[in-house]
Image (cartoon, rainbow, N blue to C red):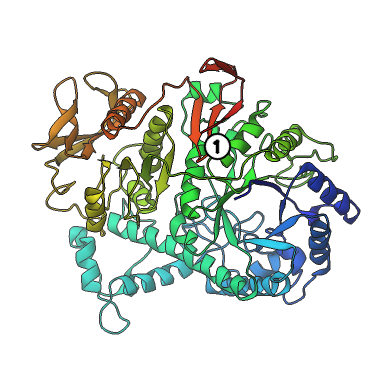
Amino acid sequence: MKRTLGTCYYPEHWPREIWEEDAARMAALGLTWVRIGEFAWSRIEPEGGRFDWGWLDDAIDVLGEAGLKVVLGTPTATPPRWVCDKHPDMFAVDADGRRRGFGSRRHYCFSHQGYLNECRRIVTEVAKRYGRNPHVAAWQTDNEYGCHDTILSYSSAARQAFRGWLRARYPGHGNDGDIKALNAAWGNVFWSMDYDDFDQIELPNLTVTEPNPAHVQAFRRFSSDQVVAFNRAQVDIIRQYSDAPISHNYMGRIVDFDHFAVGEDLEIATWDSYPLGFLEDRVGATPLDQRHYARQGDPDFQAFHHDLYRAVGKGRWWVMEQQPGPVNWAPYNPAPLPGIVRLWTWEAFAHGAEAVCYFRWRQAPFAQEQLHAGLLRPDSVAAPGFFEAEQVAEELADAPDVAPAQAPVALIFDYDAAWSWEVQPQGQGLDYFGLVFDLYRAFRRAGLSIDILPPTQRQFDGYRIVAAPGMMVMPDDLKTALMASDTEVLIGPRSACRDADFNIPVPLPPAWPDLDVTVSRLETLRPDMPIAVAGGGSVRNWFEHLEGGAEAVFETESKMPVVMRSGTTTYCGGWGDDAFFDRLVKDLCNRAGVETLDLPRGVRVRDTATERFWFNHNPHDVEIEGETLASAGVRRDPI
C-alpha cells in the first residue's frame, strides 16, 4: 500500500475566494487526502428540511479539481441547535445526574431514538448526494466516539434501552426475559438486591455506596453496544450509496467502548495522534519523563496506538489527525522539537499507516481551538509543521510502499477487561490500559516489534511470544488455542479471574490447563511499599500470592513466588516496575529464541518486511551502531 499524506480542512470557516489557493497549496505540498464536513451540519441543514448544498458541492469540486481526494465526514458529532430544540431530552446525562447541554460538541445520548433518526436522515441525505461523487474517495462516521467522556449516559432513554438489552441477554419465554436468571448471575441475594421485573432495574449511578459490579459491567457492555449500533446505522446507509471505504477516527487511551466491535463494520481504522498533549494528559509518565519528552512525546504511546488500530482496522489504518504544532487542550502545550513532526509521521508509516493527515490546514482565529496550531498560521503563512510535512512528502517519492510483516510478539488487548478493571480496580490509579502499556513498553525497550490482537483471536501461528496480561475473562476456547499454539504464552496478573457475570470462578484463577498455579489471595500496594524481587526489580501496585507445583521463575527477596511456569505457559502474579518487566521480557525472549537489543533511552526500533526504522525520541543526538542519530532523527535501514 502506498504511503500518502493529507490534512483536515474546514472550507466553511474561510472566505470562498481563498479555496482555490488553499487547494493548490495542498497539492503542491504533496498532500493526497483532505477530510471535510464532520462538523458542518448547521451549514448543510440550517433548519429542519432546508438544505444548503451549494457551498459543499463547490468545496468538493475545488479540492477534487486540484487533484485531491476527499474524506467526507458525517456531521453527527455536532447536532445544531434546532435539532436539540426539537429533541430537548436528547442530551446525555452524567453519573451525577446532570444533563449535558448545547454549546460545544458531542452533546447527544447514543440511546436516544429521536436523535438516532435525525442522524439516519442527515447521513442519508449526505450519502445520496455525494456517494457517487468521483472526488469523495473515503468516508468518516461521526467524530471521536468517546472524546470528552461521552459514552456513558444515565438518561431515561439509556435506562429504557438498558432494560431491553438485559432482557435479550437473559432471555426467558417470549420477550419478557428471565429475571431469576439475572438475579442468580449477578448474585443479587447479596444486600437484598433481587429484582421482580426488569423494569425495576435502574442505571448503576447515584447509589449510596458502590453498586453491584456485575450490574456496572453489564451497563458498560450495553453502552459499548449502543456505540456499535449507532455507528452501524450510519455505515449501512452510506453503503447503499457509495463504494468508497468507511472509517472512524478513534482517540488515544479511550477504552469506554469496544473499538474492535465498531471496526468490524468499517474498512479503515483511523486515530487522532497528539503526542505532546497525550504526554501530559494520558500517558501517565513520571515528572522526569514528562520533562525529558516535553517536546517529543512519549516514545511508546503513539506506537502502541498505531499497533492497536492496525488490529482494529484489520490491517488498514491511518492517522486522521496528526499534531503539527502546539495544541490547546493539555495542561501544558509546548511547541514540538524541530524534526519531531517528521519523526511522528515516519513512525506511523513504519507501523503500517496508509496515510497521515495533519490537523489542521490553517489555525482557526476564532472559537474553541484558536490556540491549536495548523500547517498554516491564521494569516496563511506556513507554520513550522508545514515544512516538516513538505520534507516527508519529498522523502516519500523515493520510499517503498508499506510492506507489513508479522511481528515476533503479540499482545492481546481486551476492552471488556478495561471495563472490568475500572469497575473493580482494588487500588487507587490501577487500570488495565496501564498494565498492558507497561508490558508493551518493556518489549519495545528490548528492540522488538509488536502486533496487538483482539480477544477474539484464536490463531497464533508465527508468533514466538503471546501475552495476555490482565484479561479478567478468558473463554475456554482462548485458553485452548493458546495452549495448542507453538509459542511462549504469558498471562497474569489478574488473568481469568472472573466469569462473564463478574463472579470469582472455582477452581480459583487462573484455572489454566496443565499450569499448577492458584492465586490464593491478592493485595494492592501503596506507592511507597514496593516488594523487591530477587535478582533485580520490584513489584508495585498489584501482588498476588501464588500457590502450586509449577516452577517459580522469579521470587521476592522473601522467597514468595512472583512468576511461575509450566511448559510454555508463564503466569506473572505482579505488576512489575520497568526493571522487573525488562527481566521478564528478556527471559521470555531467551526461551523463544527472539533476538533483543540494548537500546539507549528514548531510542526505538520498528521492522517492516523491507526496512528497519530507528527513531530517536531524545532532545539530543545518540550513537547507534557507530553512527550518530540526530535529535528527533529517523534512520531507515534495508532488511
**Residue at the image position 18 percent from the left and 19 percent from the top:** 557
Residue 564 x %, y %? 18, 34
Q: Residue at x 19, y 58 (%)?
A: 190
The spot of residue 432 in percent (x, y) is 36, 43
Q: Is residue 97 left or right of residue 529?
A: right
Visible residue check, residue 328: no
Within-10-Å neighbours for mark 1: few <14, some 14–19, many 20+: many
Tell me the element at label 1. helix
Q: 329 or 274: nearer the eye?
A: 274
Query: With 116 as the anchor, is 134 left or right in this view?
Result: right
For this view, does 403 lie left or right of residue 384?
left
Rendering quarter of residue 489: top left
Q: Residue at x 30, y 43 (%)?
A: 470
Q: Position of residue 155 (x, y in %)?
A: 48, 64
Amino acid type at mark 1:
Phe
Residue drawn where x is 82% and y is 41% of the image:
378
Q: Which residue is mark 1?
A: 278
